[in-house]
DNA sequence: TTGTCATCTGTCACCGTCTGACATAAATTA
DNA sequence: TAATTTATGTCAGACGGTGACAGATGACAA
């Protein structure tokens, strides 16, 4: 019943072992105080192998949140074309949160752990922001495609930039510890989206 | 007439020498291909001394833009209390651009050079965003102080986050090459601020 | 089962960033 | 000029990250 071969399963196992080992060590000793050698030793692989799975040290903590960005992009592409950019982005984000709630428990726990760590570690936070900005370009491209405008057009940039700003503010002071607290994510999201709606003029994100 | 002593002047000179050497080398060879040793050699100091002036390699390229952030904060504090947050932030930014136009020519040239480099180098751009986010906290604190609310309050976060998003979009595709093109900055700023005003409801950034 | 092939892994050597410690040289002050 | 700061150079080293090569291991066909 296991689609992937032994080799592939082994790879996934060491990948998760590295992530878990890193997350634990980071939580106990702090990010900077933990060396790649320690992570590799804890996961029972050579230091060189670590870098075959993750390009940089922060990648190991950021890989899960980055996957989340990927999901957001996928959900955005799935939204109907009638929805204006900001609405589509909002609904895509709602779908991501829902997906997180319905996902595997261990996976959710890992994600929360990683998020907590990233939020409280400046170096990791910086890396996270960097990847978010890279992804922002792809969000802009997708919005431009939906709206039938050029990616150089100001509106997609403006809409996406505003949306990420809103989302960032919404989640920055929301720290669910366990998977039980997860609905807090959804509530917080609705709260901040409501505030955004109160602040923005109707139809601002679509040309008339 | 020179207020600071010889020692202080010498320090400023090597500091500028390091910045100029770095900016030149970065422009010619690229950021990653340039080593700290090369920069130090070009500025005629030991590599160790480089790190006494700049904590990291990217610091040397980012120090000027970071100074700009400092100016923004100072100008914000100088705005009258009647101005709502977003207006005060806008006017503070206008003041920064004006200050840049009226400043020393060589200084302006350096700033433009650094900005161009940061914009086109992912690693530097990431560092730039990181520092901007650190500064964002101070902007939030200042807005909260002006409005007499807690820094934990959602509104200062929201207002500052929206403003930086707007500013970022406005400047991202504006690349004045020489000091002559500098008015383009101001025009671009007015353009994006007008778009923001069209998109936001009047009075959104202040409690009623 | 066996042998071939592709792929993953460990070892080694290396470069570049960044830091602590110590000695030296230069500027400041008396 | 002598004494005291303070900046700088030299040195050694930790850590992140990479290329190259060899050996181990799973995939696959005969």
Image: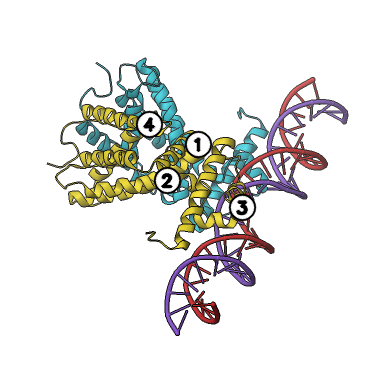
Chain colours: A yellow, B cyan, C red, D purple
Mark 4 or 2: the one toward you:
4
Mark 4: few/some/many CA within 10 Å (<14, 14-19, 20+): few
On residue B42, which mark appears? Answer: 3
Where is residue A62, by image quadrant?
A: top left
Left or right? Give the position of B148 relative to D21: left
As drawn, A185 above or below B42? above
Q: Which residue is mark 1?
A: A122
Mark 2: few/some/many CA within 10 Å (<14, 14-19, 20+): many
As drawn, A122 above or below A74? above
Q: Which residue is mark 2?
A: A64
Mark 1: few/some/many CA within 10 Å (<14, 14-19, 20+): some
Where is residue B25, by image quadrant?
A: bottom right
Q: CA distance from mark 4 to mark 2?
A: 19 Å
Q: CA distance from mark 3 to mark 1?
A: 32 Å
Q: CA distance from mark 4 to mark 3?
A: 58 Å
Mark 3: few/some/many CA within 10 Å (<14, 14-19, 20+): some
Q: CA distance from mark 4 to mark 1?
A: 27 Å
Residue B103 locus on image (x, y percent): 44, 35
């Amino acid at each position: 019943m296991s689609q992937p071969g032994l080799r592939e399963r082994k790879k996934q196992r060491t990948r998760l072992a590295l992530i878990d080992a890193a997350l634990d060590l980071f939580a106990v000793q702090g990010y900077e105080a933990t060396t790649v050698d320690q992570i590799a030793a804890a996961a029972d692989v050579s230091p060189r192998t670590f870098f075959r799975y993750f390009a940089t040290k922060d990648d190991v903590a950021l890989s899960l949140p980055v996957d989340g960005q990927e999901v957001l992009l996928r959900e955005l592409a799935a939204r109907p074309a009638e929805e204006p950019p900001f609405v589509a982005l909002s609904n895509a984000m709602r779908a991501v949160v829902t997906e997180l709630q319905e996902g595997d428990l261990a996976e959710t726990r890992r994600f929360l752990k990683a998020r907590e760590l990233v939020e409280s570690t400046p170096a990791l936070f910086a890396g996270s922001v960097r990847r978010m900005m890279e992804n922002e370009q792809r969000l802009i491209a997708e919005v431009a495609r939906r709206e039938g405008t050029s990616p150089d057009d100001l509106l997609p940039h403006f809409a996406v930039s505003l949306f990420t700003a809103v989302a960032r503010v919404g989640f920055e002071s929301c720290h669910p510890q366990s998977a039980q607290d997860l609905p807090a994510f959804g509530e917080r999201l609705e709260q901040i989206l409501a505030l955004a709606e109160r602040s923005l003029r109707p139809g601002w994100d679509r040309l008339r």
